[in-house]
Image (tube, rainbow, N blue to C red):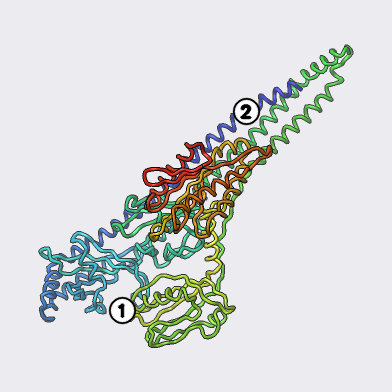
Amino acid sequence: MKIRNYLISLLAAFSIVPVLTVMVSSITFFQSNTTELLQKNVESDATQAADILDQFFAQRKSALEVAADLPGVKQLLLSSNNGEPEKELQQYRKLAVNTFITITSRQTAIRKGNSQGNYVKRSCLVNQKDIVIASDDSEAMGVHSPIGEIMRNVPIDKMYVSDIMQNPNYIGGRKYFEVAVPIFFGGVYQGFLQSTIDMTYFDQICRHTFMETGRTFIIDPMGSVASEYFTDADGNELSNIKSMSGNSDFYQRLQEKDLDKNPSGTIFYSVNGVNKFGYYSRVAGEDWMIVSLVKQEELLRPIQHMIRVYIILLLIFIALLIAIACLEANRFLNPIRDLSAAFEEVEKGDYQTQLSGTYKGEFAEMALSFNHLIEKIKEDTDVLKLNETRYALIMEETNQVVFEWDIRLNRIYHTVYWTSKFGSSAVDEHPDSGIPNFRQVHPDDKIIMDDLFRSILLSGQPGPVDVRMKDICGSYIWCTVNVKALYDKTNKPYRAIGLITDTDSQKKKMQQLENKSRTDLLTQLYNKVTTESLIKEHLKNSSQLLQGLIIIDIDNFKSINDTLGHIFGDAVLKKVASDIKRLFRMSDIIGRTGGDEFIVFVKDMESRELLNVKMQEVCEVFRNAYTGEDGTYKVSASVGGAVYPDGGSTFAELYRHADEALYSAKNSGKDSYSLYSGTFLESAQ
């Protein structure tokens, strides 16, 4: 038995342990290098696409500048600004229009099937009065350009790039944007030359894929995707990063980036629990951005494959070791074991022991022991299983209400589902009021709906708003209202299409999560961040009344945990938090800001004496005996306070002075309180 145990120990020490060590080290090294390499691949794809886009915008700028510098274009612009008659302008306009036709026809992009498509849809020359005086699109002639005021502030060497736009009456309702360069003569602004560009060129970049789940897309400053139809790796259409499908925090993560300091960099986010990695880079100056994204599970896939290979090799190696050990045991261990058994019998005084009589039984025992060892090894190795997580996007089918607003008549038309959702007559029609009146909207949210419709009347395109609306059962539910307006040739809205979505369950879940994030899980008091935020907000809007800040620190709390255990320590914290909460008003702010530190903010006090009374009551609460199993441990606290405005006009000043008072109480022997007052401290036991 001793020989068997010794051989098993040697087998583990010199075979399995080194193999496991090498395997773990190799996987760790492979993981760090592979992940970095794949991330560099994503960065390279985004950087390459950003370079292409920078070249694209640089070429557009160069083409516009060359065209603007042509004599015919210059003369037409000067003549128009000088008020010369239309007859004098015709000869120059014809030259300018031919130039624009050349620009439009030569700006092409290779599409699928090697066919070429023009991505410059039209070019326009605009004078000082923001009127189009020459264009290869006859419908644009004489139209007032909406970007005229913007172009007056564009430097002479810069090019303006607009946000992505979409007009159902222009180029079939497809997306487009404007690029323009200002024209100066003798340092004086004369007008500008602009081109309208559709998504033909950008669709090529957005169709580009890398790896299996890698996608690249371009966004404008408003988050709109520069593509007619872009889908992510899961087949979900994406038109704006602010409205990504599923529970995505991409837009939130991007907002956390300081893009001025870091115009390019990596970004980690998730969609419905699926972790993703990306790289972003600004293009077109500081306005547009290109993003390359890939699922993190694809980055980890080579590592997972490597782990599986290592495990298979390890199992094969262990099986070979066991086979060799069994073969060697037949040759060497059986005679040694027979001899050992014979020696044991001899020690008992039996000198008649025969080795042949014990050989078969010992061999059976050895075989049984090795079988147990094999089973144990298999049991240990079976624990190393890879669980591959399968993710699926769950799209919930929700009933939505669609309505149409005839702005000129101020009349609402809606789908049948409106009646089943909100009741029969949901809208009051008042032609003279200018905007519809939704009776189902909560009175507190009515101003939000009114502002939404007024914004449309002012030729705006407002984003969606969240309001409470009374359903057919008479209960208020949260709904998201999104309205898009249609404009006539004079850029005045004449009709709007609205969509009302029931988001009550999602809204309430978000409110529950927000409430949970504001509290300390153990004591159910406010956590540190929330406490400080609420105090600062109150101080910002506080009146001339006195405000009090109290800091409470449990004396020798570490010894409580060390002596009575963390479970008892947690019980003390919960009991103390409950007792402190009963001492103060519902309007006061109470929070746990550290392991054994609490803060109380007493609002709108009539006198300083009230804070002294409250601090004394806090000390009395702690002087109650909190005991462990031995029933002998006493808990006390040191308390420091400061009064607004004498003790500070900001949270930082109040906290610093209250902290000084706290340490004065501790230096006085603990189990006491102290109040900061000007340059001295008022203390009491």
Question: x and y percent of residue 432 in the render?
Answer: 38, 87
Left or right, 313 with respect to 245, comes to right
Looking at the rendered structure, the kind of residue marked 2 is Ser
Q: Is residue 640 above or below residue 21?
A: below
Residue located at (54% from left, 39% from top): 555
Decide if residue 412 is on the left or right side of residue 287. right
Residues 531 and 405: in front is: 531
What residue is rendered at 20% in x and 76% in y?
A: 131
Nearer to me, 86 or 260: 260
* Picture disc at residue 491: 1
- Whether residue 250 is visible here, answered yes or no, is no
Label 1 Cα crowd, 10 Å radius (few <14 / some 14-19 / many 20+): few
Measured along the vertical axis of the image, is residue 128 above or below residue 47?
A: below
Q: Is residue 390 left or right of residue 643?
A: right
Question: In what quadrant of the picture does the N terminus appear?
Answer: top right
Give the quarter of the image for residue 100.
bottom left
Give the x, y percent position of residue 300: 51, 46
Residue placed under numbered mark 2 in the picture = 15
The span from disc 1 to disc 2 (Cα, nearest Å) is: 81 Å
Say what amino acid the circle numbered 1 marks.
Asn
Disc 1 or disc 2, which is closer to the eye?
1
| Residue at (49% x, 59% y) in the render | 248
Question: Of residues 91 and 247, which is closer to you in this image?
Answer: 247
Residue at screen point 55% across, 82% down = 423
Secondary structure category for the residue under label 1: loop
Q: Which mark is residue 427?
A: none
301 left or right of 337 in image: left
